[in-house]
Amino acid sequence: MYANLITHTSRQRGSTLLISLGVLTAITVGATVAMQQSTTQVRMVTNMNVEKQTFAASYSHLTRAVKNLGNSSGALLTDLIARQNASIAAQKAAGIDDADIQYNSATIDAYTDFGWQQPDSALLNSVGDTQVVITYPAEQVQQRDTTPVNPKDNEGSSSAASSVYPFVLTATTASEHGNITSTQQIGIKRKGASAQ
């Protein structure tokens, strides 16, 4: 009877070991899954933060460019129109058909070409490079307003007629690693003297 009791106790100890190993395995698997989910969530939050930072940098560069453009004399837009018209004339002189002319080929990198001060993005540590480009979309039909306006707006135009010139400002910001970009555009119209 004593030998039977020892055998029964040994079997119980073996089953306890197996149950303990099963519970320990289940806890380990559960902890591993929880860690993987939390790592994925951390990556998602980090990507959202980088995306918001690139958006903020792009937006601040775009609004600063619009402000600088409003404070400028208009010479840079006149230069841009001249560049675009020269590009179109060169294409026509090369025998390119009107339907095949490449518009928007003349652009200005506002901060590089004119030395405008860029917004401070030191706090946006995930942001890489930002570029703001101003384009004159010459293929759009210019609206013509022939009513006399302020003569200062029509300097160089003896007829005192003005035209509305459309411009597109595009700000593109890339993240530090280049895997996330934010591009924003704004269209503006500037009234000026009609072309002669």
Image (spheres, grey):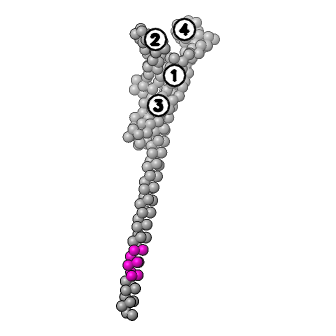
Q: 110 or 184: nearer the eye?
A: 184
Would you say residue 195 is visible in this rendering? yes
Labels 1 and 4: the sequence-earlier one: 4
Disc 1 + disc 2, Cβ < 8 Å: no
- Above or below, comparing residue 112 to residue 85 in the picture: below
Coordinates of residue 77 in the picture (x, y in percent): 48, 19
Mark 3 = which residue?
A: 171
Mark 4 vs mark 3, CA separation in Å: 33 Å
Give the residue displayed 61% in from the left and 13% down from the top: 145
Give the residue displayed 46% in from the left and 11% down from the top: 97
Residue 167: which disc?
A: 1
- Above or below, comparing residue 57 to residue 141 in the picture: below
Give the residue displayed 54% in from the left and 18% down from the top: 140
Alpha-carbon neighbours of circle 3 within 10 Å: few (<14), some, or many (≥20)? many
Mark 2 = which residue?
A: 97
Labels 1 and 2: the sequence-earlier one: 2
Labels 4 and 3: the sequence-earlier one: 4
- Front position among marks 1 and 2: 2
Q: Amino acid at mark 1?
A: Phe
Labels 4 and 2: the sequence-earlier one: 2
Instruction: Provide the residue span drawn in magenta.
Output: 11-19
Identity of the residue furthest to the right in this view: 147
Would you say residue 152 is visible in this rendering? no
Residue 157: which disc?
A: 4
Q: Is residue 16 magenta?
A: yes
Coordinates of residue 159 in the picture (x, y in percent): 58, 6
Mark 1 vs mark 4, CA separation in Å: 21 Å
Disc 1 + disc 3, Cβ < 8 Å: no
Mark 4 vs mark 2, CA separation in Å: 31 Å
Coordinates of residue 172 in the picture (x, y in percent): 45, 32
